Structure formats: C-alpha cells, structure tokens
Amino acid sequence: MNTLNTITARTGRMTLAINKLELLNQDEGRPILSYLIKHVHVSLVDIILHTGMDTSVVENYLEKLLQNGFVWKEQSDTRIIYTLDQSYFQKITLVAKTLAGFWT
C-alpha cells in the first residue's frame, strides 16, 4: 500500500471514529443511552415510556446506534428488544476518556 492510500485509509477510519463519538454526545440520545447503560436489555416501549421521548426520535436514535454497532436489535411478533453491546461501548468510552486527557 502506498503512502497516499495509507493516509486515506487512516483518515477514513478517523472520520468514522469521530462520527461514533459525536453520536454518543448528541443531547437527544443521552436519556436513551443512560437507560440502556442501566438496563442493558430493554424493549423499545420501555425506552419510550421511561424517557418520555417521542417514538420517532427514539427509533431514529436507536437505528443510528444499531448502524454504529452500539446495540443489537431483536424483533418478535410482539416487541422489539435492544441490547447494549457493553464491550464495544466501553472501548469507545475508554478512547474518548484517553483523548480528553490530552486537553486537561
């Protein structure tokens, strides 16, 4: 791989990492993340009832979490369950804390 390809690949990975951190930092997602962290394995209805947030906002944010690997989704005939990938979430938060340490 030449230098330009290496730089391009690293820049792409860095952009993805930044996007993931920004997703976790969105104000609208904090109540959802907080509930997921406390309960790990929850239904869509539980999140909506607990947070008092609009269904479409919760669904959209959970979809972003799903696309970025933070949660798994299980769907049955009667409900949708989301499970926080605790290991992945802990890795991302460790990176964020390490980076934050450079500026404190």
Image (spheres, rainbow, N blue to C red):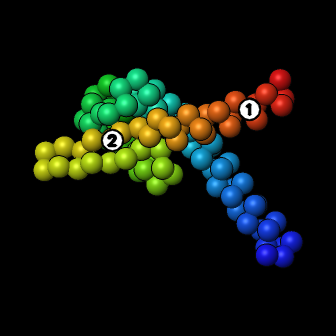
Q: Dot 2 lies on which element?
A: strand
Residue at the image position 13 percent from the left and 45 percent from the top: 78
Residue 97, image x, y percentages: 70, 30
Rendering coords of residue 10 (x, y %): 75, 61
Q: Is residue 103 above or below residue 10?
A: above
Q: CA distance from mark 1 to mark 2?
A: 28 Å
Quadrant position of residue 81:
top left
Q: Which mark is residue 36?
A: none
Tell me: 17 left or right of 81. right
Nearer to us: label 1 or label 2: 1
Q: Are marks 1 and 2 in contact (CB under 8 Å)?
A: no
Point out the image quarter for the C terminus.
top right
Outermost residue toward the left?
A: 77
Classify 13 as above or below 41: below
Q: Tell me which numbered mark, 1 or 2, is placed earlier along the sequence.
A: 2
Residue 61 visible in the snapshot: no
Please tell me whether mark 1 sits on a helix, a strand or a loop: helix
Task: Check disc 2 and report the residue beneath it.
Answer: 82
Closer to the camera, 43 or 55?
43
Q: Residue at x 27, y 48 (%)?
A: 74
Residue in the picture at 32% in, 25% down = 50
Given the image, on which type of amino acid does mark 1 rest? Thr
Residue type at mark 2 is Tyr
Q: Return the x and y of residue 23 as percentages of the image width and height.
A: 57, 44
- Quarter in which the N terminus is drawn: bottom right
Position of 58 with respect to 2 (left or right) is: left
Q: Residue furthest front?
A: 1
Q: Would you say 83 lies left or right of 15 here? A: left
> Percent position (x, y) of residue 19?
63, 50
Q: Residues within 10 Å of mark 2 (few under 14, many from 20)?
A: many
Residue 71 showing in the rendered view: yes
The residue where tag 1 is placed is 98
